[in-house]
């Protein structure tokens, strides 16, 4: 699904989607910067959640019972995400994503909700997020 | 004449396929018995793994406040099961929580049922869960949610373990596998 653009065509946000969730949800999207200067995604808001944060999942390893285990997934909060000049960033499973914390209702497959993204240079953009059906 | 040749060819192909399946089964014997446990399911009822012999099972560990990797795994398993259709009707997908403080049976029921109403979510006391994590080599660590409104997150092993109807471990996958890859693992666990 292609949806939404920010302030003219400087920053393009497309394919914003989510998963079924209770309590804490996710948003993935592709963010493209068509200008010659980098911009930064530094905030997001949605009426369906109390707070939206930028997080990154990483795969690592950990020691357990004398063995080293790989495939240990963890998440870290990221304060902002740089969108390079004439480049794009894709928020996708297992990497960068938006975490929608304190969901006001369970997110069901097929439902849609609005999301506002704030870019340091280009200001606010509103997109429609679709909860991808199973 | 052509027709009878075709019939012979089809018969030979069938025999070869059967021999191949038997050889593959011998080359890929089942693993050790999946460690048994009793936990509490999403309806508040006891769930004992060994009581589910006769069903193939995909077992993985996660939690409801996990927005990225866990729903990715659940969605892929739900799609894999749907792809296989009726042949996977008896296949059980079981999520064991790594966050028992937040994942009550009621929370797990709401969560897993968003993906497939037949999925199972298990929780328990830490005393019940720790030996299960140990037995399945599941690393888990509560990471302080410093600077995040999510409270805390749980770093955890992302493997999906496949158990055959005879109760033996049959394969592993993980959150990054496609529905097609997970469907193949499901079929192997059922064979």
Image: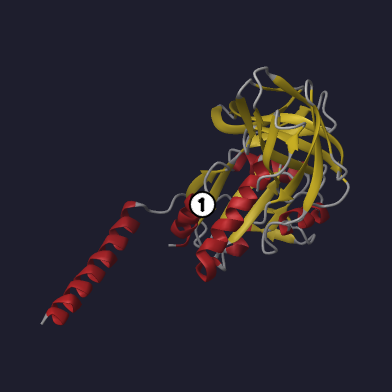
Name the one closer to the observer, B88 or B35.
B88
Q: Which residue is mark 1?
A: B182
Q: Is residue A108 left or right of residue A85?
A: right
Residue at far front of view: A8
Q: Is residue B3 above or below residue B66?
A: below
Give residue B13's position: percent from left, percent from top.
Answer: 22, 68
Name the one closer to the observer, B147 or A124.
A124
Residue at far top of view: A37
Is label 1 in a helix, a strand or a loop? helix
Give residue B94's position: percent from left, percent from top.
Answer: 64, 54
Q: Residues within 10 Å of mark 1 (few under 14, many from 20)?
A: many
| Quadrant of the rendering where the C terminus of chain B is positioned | bottom left
Provide the chain ID for the residue under circle 1: B
In terms of image quadrants, where is residue B70?
top right
Residue under the point 74% across and 32% down:
A8
Give residue A30's position: percent from left, percent from top.
Answer: 65, 36
Q: Is residue A21 left or right of residue B36?
A: right
Name the one closer to the observer, A82 or B147.
A82
Residue under the point 82% across and 56% down:
B106
Residue under the point 54% across and 57% down:
B80
Give residue A122's position: percent from left, percent from top.
Answer: 78, 25
Asked whether residue A55 is in view, the answer is yes
């Amino acid at each position: 699904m292609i949806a939404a653009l920010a302030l003219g065509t400087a920053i393009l946000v497309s394919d914003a989607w989510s998963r079924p969730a209770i309590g804490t949800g996710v948003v993935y999207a592709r963010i493209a910067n068509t200008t010659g200067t980098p911009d930064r995604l530094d905030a997001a808001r949605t009426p369906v959640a109390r707070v939206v944060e930028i997080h990154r999942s990483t795969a690592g390893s950990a020691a357990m019972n004398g063995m080293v285990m790989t495939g240990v997934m963890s998440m870290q909060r990221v304060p902002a995400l740089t969108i390079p000049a004439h480049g794009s960033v894709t928020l996708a499973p297992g990497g960068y994503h938006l975490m929608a914390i304190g969901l006001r209702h369970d997110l069901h497959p097929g439902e849609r909700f609005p999301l506002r993204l704030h870019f340091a240079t280009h200001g606010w953009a509103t997109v429609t997020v679709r909860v991808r059906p199973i | 004449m052509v027709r009878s040749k075709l019939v012979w060819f089809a018969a030979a192909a069938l025999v070869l396929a059967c021999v191949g399946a038997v050889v593959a089964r011998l080359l890929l014997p089942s693993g050790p018995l999946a460690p048994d446990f009793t936990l509490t399911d999403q309806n508040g009822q006891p769930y004992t793994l060994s009581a589910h012999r006769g069903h193939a099972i995909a077992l993985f560990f996660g939690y409801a406040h996990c927005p990225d990797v866990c729903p990715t795994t659940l969605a892929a398993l739900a799609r894999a099961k749907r792809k296989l259709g009726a042949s996977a009707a008896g296949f059980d997908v079981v999520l064991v929580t790594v966050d028992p403080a937040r994942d009550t049976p009621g929370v797990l029921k709401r969560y897993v049922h968003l993906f497939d109403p037949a999925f199972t979510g298990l929780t328990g006391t830490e005393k019940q869960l720790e030996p299960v994590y140990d037995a399945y080599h599941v690393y888990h660590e509560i990471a302080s949610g410093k600077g995040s409104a999510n409270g805390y997150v749980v770093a955890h092993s992302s493997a999906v373990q496949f158990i055959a109807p005879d109760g033996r471990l049959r394969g592993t996958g993980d959150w990054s596998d496609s529905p097609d890859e997970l469907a193949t693992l499901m079929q192997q666990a059922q064979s």
